[in-house]
Image (cartoon, rainbow, N blue to C red):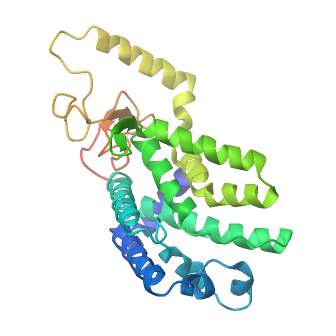
């Protein structure tokens, strides 16, 4: 999306680097608060629409300190480490600006959901950071679909399947819930829906792009034995350099250019009659 790329060029210098450091730090404060001052979060810091409209505007930020595992110390430590790794990897691949936009879009969606449900439906929903953390996982699974997690520390399962199972759970809640529940689920996860609709390259469905990739795949099939099928146009690495390295095409580039996961979002698009310039960013 051209608008988003222009926005990134203008404002990426204001992005918060290593955002997950601060988020996990806030979760740590929230955990201590839940352990030693139970009730303080709900009474003074939670996302409560009536309180916000009465003047307690700090709640639109302070609700973020709620830890992902409630008062369970062990589960909290595991969850905080998991979400830290998810966020750090997304920031590494997307860049700080895109990750900031994605995360804060989720925050805005939470606040908007609480206000809309209260103002237009007369109901009060108390949102914590649950949907926000799920949106991080969905984004990670969409970016690294084949990366495996150990379910219950034993069962290996790919990220895409875990995301699908969680998606079915939320879809079921959306279908069977009341209107307030539907609005809450939709707006709280709207950052995932909007971000990937607007920034994912939909040109891959273009017949021209489909034909180009088909021709390229035919050329790959006749490659001599011992050759490589994937090579990053920026760093030159192939699947032989790292078996876990993922490669994807960029259909915004003119020609058959393929990039590794580290440079997919940071390379400079190749325009007609302009050769690739190597490791440069947008």
Left or right of residue 234, residue 180 in this image: right
**From the viewer's perspective, is residue 111 above or below residue 148?**
below
Near-viewer residue (126 or 191):
126
Residue located at (48% from left, 41% from top): 162
Query: Quick check: can you spot residue 265?
Result: yes
**From the viewer's perspective, is residue 209 above or below residue 50?**
above
Left or right of residue 239, residue 282 in this image: right
User: Where's residue 176, x and y in %?
Assistant: 77, 47
Near-viewer residue (277 or 194):
194
User: Where's residue 163, x and y in %?
Assistant: 50, 42
Residue located at (75% from left, 83% from top): 50
User: Where's residue 66, x and y in %?
Assistant: 50, 74
Left or right of residue 207, residue 56 in this image: right
- Seen as rendered, the residue at the extreme right is 121
- Seen as rendered, the residue at the extreme bottom is 55
**From the viewer's perspective, is residue 135 above or below residue 122?**
above
Q: How many marks?
A: 0
Residue located at (36% from left, 76% from top): 25
Near-viewer residue (65 or 94):
65
Looking at the rendered image, the quarter that the C terminus falls into is bottom left
Query: Quick check: can you spot residue 147?
Result: no
User: Where's residue 6, x and y in %?
Assistant: 49, 59
**From the viewer's perspective, is residue 266 above or below residue 235?**
below
């Amino acid at each position: 999306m051209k608008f988003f790329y222009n926005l990134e060029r203008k404002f990426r210098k204001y992005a918060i680097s290593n955002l997950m450091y601060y988020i996990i730090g806030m979760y740590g404060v929230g955990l201590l608060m839940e352990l030693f001052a139970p009730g303080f979060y709900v009474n003074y810091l939670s996302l409560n629409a009536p309180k916000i409209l009465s003047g307690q505007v700090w709640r639109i930020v302070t609700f973020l300190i709620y830890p992902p595992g409630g008062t369970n110390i062990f589960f909290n430590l595991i969850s905080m480490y998991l979400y830290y790794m998810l966020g750090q990897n997304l920031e590494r691949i997307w860049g700080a600006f895109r990750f900031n936009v994605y995360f804060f879009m989720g925050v805005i969606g939470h606040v908007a959901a609480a206000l809309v449900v209260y103002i237009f439906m007369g109901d009060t929903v108390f949102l914590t950071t649950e949907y926000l953390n799920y949106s991080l996982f969905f984004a990670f699974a969409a970016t690294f679909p084949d990366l495996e997690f150990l379910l219950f520390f034993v069962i290996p399962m790919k990220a895409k399947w875990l995301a699908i199972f969680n998606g079915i759970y939320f879809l079921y809640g959306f279908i069977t819930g009341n209107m307030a529940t539907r609005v809450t689920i939709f707006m709280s996860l709207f950052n995932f829906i909007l971000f990937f609709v607007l920034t994912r390259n939909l040109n891959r469905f273009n017949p021209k792009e489909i034909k180009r990739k088909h021709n390229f795949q035919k050329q790959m099939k006749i490659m001599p034995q011992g050759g490589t099928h994937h090579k990053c146009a920026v760093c030159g690495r192939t699947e032989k350099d790292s078996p876990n390295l993922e490669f994807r095409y960029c259909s915004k580039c003119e020609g058959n250019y393929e990039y590794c996961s580290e440079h997919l979002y940071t390379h400079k698009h190749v325009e007609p009659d302009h050769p690739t310039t190597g490791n440069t960013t947008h």
